[in-house]
Image (cartoon, helix red, strand yellow):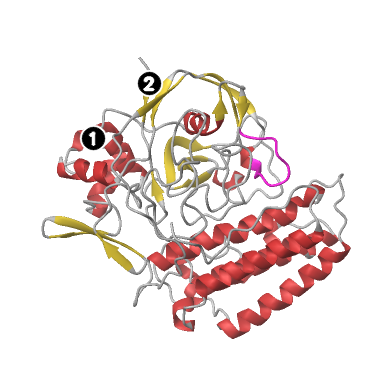
Amino acid sequence: MTASRLTTPAPYAAPPSKQAIADLLTEARDRTLLLISRLSDEDLHQQHDPLMSPIIWDVGHIAHFEELWLTKNLDGPIEFSEMPGLYNPFEHPRATRASLGLPTLAEMSERLREIRSHVLDRLDTVTFDDRNPLLREGYVYNMVLQHEYQHNETILQTLQLKKGEPYRAPRSIAFAKRPTRNPEMISVEGGKVAIGTDDRTAAYDNERPQHTVELRPFLIDRDPVSNARYIEFIADRGYEREELWSEAGRRWLVETGATAPKYWVRRGDHWMTRTMDLSATPDPVRPVCHVCYYEAEAFAAWDGKRLPTEFEWEAAASWDPSTKQHREFPWGNSRADSKSANIDQLSFDTAPIGTYDRNVSPAGCYGMIGDVWEWTSSDFHGYPGFQSFPYKEYSEEFFGSAYKVLRGGSWATRPGAFRNSFRNWDYPIRRQIFSGFRCARDAG
Ligand SMILES: [Fe+2]
């Protein structure tokens, strides 16, 4: 890897200092502004895809979410529905947001500065009251930071879909070539494992409470599925063999006519793919990206395997059988930096599998954090004893069988918005997200 221009901030340790919080807020905003700094007003206001908001909407939504939680809420309880209508995601579906009369970038920048200045003034006088779960150890600040980090990733999905000239990505690292690794499976003993967390400083409500789950022994791929393996699947007529696809998967295939991951095109006898402004043949040793749940499921069937459940995934990423402890990250409990994993929008691409020595879980799985979000076979539900906090529109509104859980974070995920217990979710047809997968199998 070459040296990094962007830097990854150190997280603050509890109890947080106000200066550390202010620094993290500044750093988060600098990153958002860096990502959009090369875009014209037209780029920012355009609907690049019906799935995504105009980028200026995300920016306004980030700021008004912050205003809601870090100013209004500190003066008395609020409801999420108090979010100004223009930026309330429940009032305006993404596909309609370009017609909302959104401010120009100059107007929006002024609004961002205004809100931020109120937030910092309020931070000066706030007390981190232990009796208030929103303020205890600065939780609400972490929540707002994570929200901005998560919208950075959403903005990058839009930028990958951008109309007109491709987005010129501000890359700060590039990767050395790596040799191919043979596919291997890791055996996980199962038994009683701890799933989720009781953390109240940063975790979302859907990660709590920590609870014990009994798992049967299973095998799980050591590495995420690579482009090379995925190309074998395509070449073996994977998209044409009905028996590999679930009924819903077959419907998706008929509706879309898909023959390869999103952003792949056939050029003569080979595939080409594009990540932002770089086009290349898919690197055989990098994880496959931009596949939907149904594609992952069909590949697994072709490979004589299945997708892991989210509990199996979490056990393989976090459970240390020697200490019977749940790790916060595959490498331990220390937060990620740029040497831990391919994260934080430094590369704007996946990395060759094996690049990060440290990114290995106690079970021996590589790359469970970073590169690509990994599809699991689990629907998105609350854990036993789930309590919505602090607003039901984050998780609870989405519980049910419409969504599948993804785990692990991608190259576009900022530190602070991933951990072993972090749960992402999306419709099984989605593939504009930075999504890949690994497979599992019952032991014996
Ligand atoms: Fe949001």
- The reply to whether discs 1 and 2 touch (Cβ–Cβ < 8 Å) is no
Q: Residue 350's spot in the image, x, y percent?
A: 39, 53
**Residue underneath mark 2:** 442
Residue 251 drawn at (x, y percent)? 27, 45
User: Is residue 203 found inside the magenta-colored segment of the image?
Assistant: yes
Could you tell me which residue is drawn at 68 percent across and 60 percent down? 81
Quick one: label 1 or label 2, which is nearer the N terminus? Answer: 1
* Count of marks placed on residues: 2
The amino acid type of the residue labelled 2 equals: Asp
Q: Nearer the viewer, residue 346 or 209?
A: 346
Q: Find residue 244 and name its label.
A: 1
Which of the two residues, 201 or 10, is positioned nearer the viewer here?
Answer: 10
Residue 403 % position (x, y):
46, 43
Give the residue drawn at x 11%, y 56%: 269
Q: Is residue 83 visible?
A: no
Q: CA distance from mark 1 to mark 2?
A: 18 Å
Q: Is residue 290 above or below residue 387?
A: below
Residue at the location (57% across, 68% down)? 32
* Residue found 48% across the figure and 77% down from its top: 44
Residue 248 shows up from this direction: yes
| Quarter containing the N terminus | bottom left
